[in-house]
Amino acid sequence: MDAEEKRVLELILKKQKGSADLLGILQEVEGKYGHITRETLSYLSEKLEVPLSTLYHLVTFYRCFHLEPVEKVVKVCVGTTCHLKGGEALYQQVKGSGGYQVEKARCLGCCNTAPALELDGELMSGDAGRERMKEAR
């Protein structure tokens, strides 16, 4: 773990001080680096005084976390509203696009744009997402 990574982790831990929000801390690390290394899990375990097995369980249980760097991730909402408005069809279209790791999300919380997707951390309608993915290739 380099000095920059330790500095950022310290900032995250200070921000979350006194919080038992393990998922929030892990999400911040994942958001910053795109994955969570085993070394980072060991560091967090020591600093948070949480068993390494607990952190590892969380990271491997929730699909939003990755232990290795991944391609660009696209999350397609297949929650109730998005499902009714074509979320599953959008998932199948996007899945075959190539260059992206495509995941299903139960709800992205933006039913007004259904079917919705998240691309590079930005929520958007399925149409806008498809266009952005075409431009990126």
Image (cartoon, helix red, strand yellow):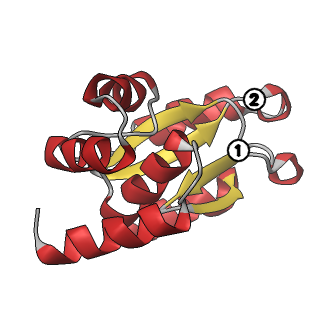
**Residue under pointer 1:** 108
Q: Please give the name of the residue rendered at 14% of the width and 76% of the height, measured from the top-left corner.
A: 3
Q: Please give the name of the residue rendered at 47% of the width and 68% of the height, measured from the top-left corner.
A: 14
| Above/below status of 133 relative to 57 | below
The reply, left or right, for residue 115 in relation to residue 36 is right
Marks 1/2: CA–CA distance: 8 Å
Residue 29, percent across and down? 38, 57
Q: Earlier in the sequence, mark 1 or mark 2?
A: 2
Tell me whether the residue at label 1 lies in contact with that at label 2, contact meaning CB atoms closer than 8 angstroms.
yes
Q: Please give the name of the residue rendered at 14% of the width and 47% of the height, measured from the top-left corner.
A: 39
Say which amino acid is labelled 1: Leu
Q: Secondary structure at mark 1?
A: loop
Instruction: Give the image quarter of residue 96.
Output: top left
Say which of 13 and 61 sits in front.
13
**Residue 73 appears in the rendering:** yes
Q: Secondary structure at mark 2?
A: loop
Instruction: Give the image quarter of residue 105.
Output: top right
Residue 22, percent across and down? 50, 41
The reply, left or right, for residue 36 in relation to residue 95 is left
Residue 77, percent across and down? 66, 37
**Residue under pointer 2:** 79
Q: Please give the name of the residue rendered at 22% of the width and 69% of the height, measured from the top-left corner.
A: 5
| Above/below status of 53 relative to 27 | above
| Quadrant showing the C terminus | bottom left
The reply, left or right, for residue 134 in relation to residue 33 is right
**Residue 134 appears in the rendering:** no
Say which amino acid is labelled 2: Gly
Mark 2 packing: few (<14 Cα in 10 Å), some, or many (20+)? many
